[in-house]
């Protein structure tokens, strides 16, 4: 199944809002770090319901926000969630971003970058559209060190890229970025069920669940354009 078909189904089932609820616990901390100034232009890559772009408009006064998604139904839903004329949504491919060179100040992506067919090429495209001094905040829960997420590939028909911390840094540098920072954002808000409910179908041990959310959380890699 293609990215478009897979996530059109998710949008039709209302799972775009569910993604927002699950990701917000760590996404909000990544968004708070972004050096967005009033009036700047921001790209939300793989925007889903569009929550990240709307948050940057409300909290940081971003001037123009573009949410790009490969699934038309996702973009259609996102448009319905806001009447802000400075927030727009486009259907596009991660490998060919529909923006002029040096036209974006900052870019963000939460739990979407690993769906890129050619992630290194996507990084090069981001490097192209970002202005000098611009940043790309790339947040993922699916990465090599987080072994608890490796089973996700078995549950979805789309090929996913599973890089390690080091592979993210290497790819960012190869695409022309400096590494601004890289760390993990622990999820302190997800409610861990009481011990009496274990074992479960998804977790062999309580310790594994706690490790997944509290220790690994979300991997954030920040690239800066020279």
Image: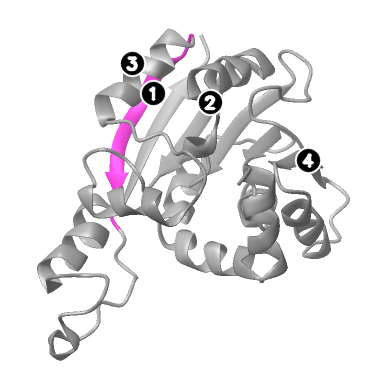
User: Which residues, given as a range, are shown in magenta?
Assistant: 176-186
Quadrant of the rendered image containing residue 117: top right
Q: Mark 2 and mark 3: span between their CA atoms?
A: 16 Å
Q: Mark 2 and mark 4: span between their CA atoms?
A: 22 Å
> Contact (CB < 8 A) between labels 1 and 2?
yes
Q: Main secondary structure of the magenta part?
A: strand
Relative depth, front residue between 198 and 109: 198
> Any mark on residue 180, and which?
1
Q: Circle 2 sits on which residue?
A: 135
Closest to the camera, between mark 2 and mark 3, is 3
- Which circle's residue, 1 or 2, is located before the other in the chain? 2
Closest to the camera, between mark 2 and mark 4, is 4
Quadrant of the rendered image containing residue 33: top left
Q: Residue at x 24, y 83 (%)?
A: 193
Q: Mark 3 and mark 1: span between their CA atoms?
A: 13 Å
Relative depth, front residue between 179 and 170: 170
């Amino acid at each position: 199944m293609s990215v478009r078909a897979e996530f059109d189904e998710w949008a039709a089932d209302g799972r775009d809002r569910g993604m927002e609820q699950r990701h917000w616990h760590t996404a909000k901390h990544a968004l708070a770090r972004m050096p967005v100034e009033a009036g700047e232009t921001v790209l939300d890559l793989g925007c889903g319901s569009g929550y990240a772009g709307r948050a940057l408009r409300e909290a940081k006064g971003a001037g123009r926000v573009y949410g790009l998604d490969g699934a038309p139904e996702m973009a259609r839903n996102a448009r319905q969630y806001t009447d802000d004329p400075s927030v727009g949504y486009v259907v596009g491919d991660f490998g060919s971003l529909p923006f002029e060179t040096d036209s974006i100040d900052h870019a963000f992506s939460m739990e979407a970058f690993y769906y890129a067919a050619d992630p290194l090429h996507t990084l090069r495209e981001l490097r192209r559209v970002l202005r000098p001094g611009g940043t790309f905040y790339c947040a993922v829960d699916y990465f090599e060190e987080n072994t608890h997420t490796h089973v996700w590939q078995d549950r979805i028909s789309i090929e996913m890229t599973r890089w390690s911390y080091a592979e993210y840094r290497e790819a960012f540098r190869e695409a022309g970025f400096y590494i601004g920072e890289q760390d993990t954002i622990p999820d302190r808000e997800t409610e861990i069920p009481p011990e009496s409910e274990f074992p479960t179908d998804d977790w062999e041990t309580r310790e594994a669940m706690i490790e997944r959310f509290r220790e690994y959380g979300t991997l954030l890699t920040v690239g800066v354009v020279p």
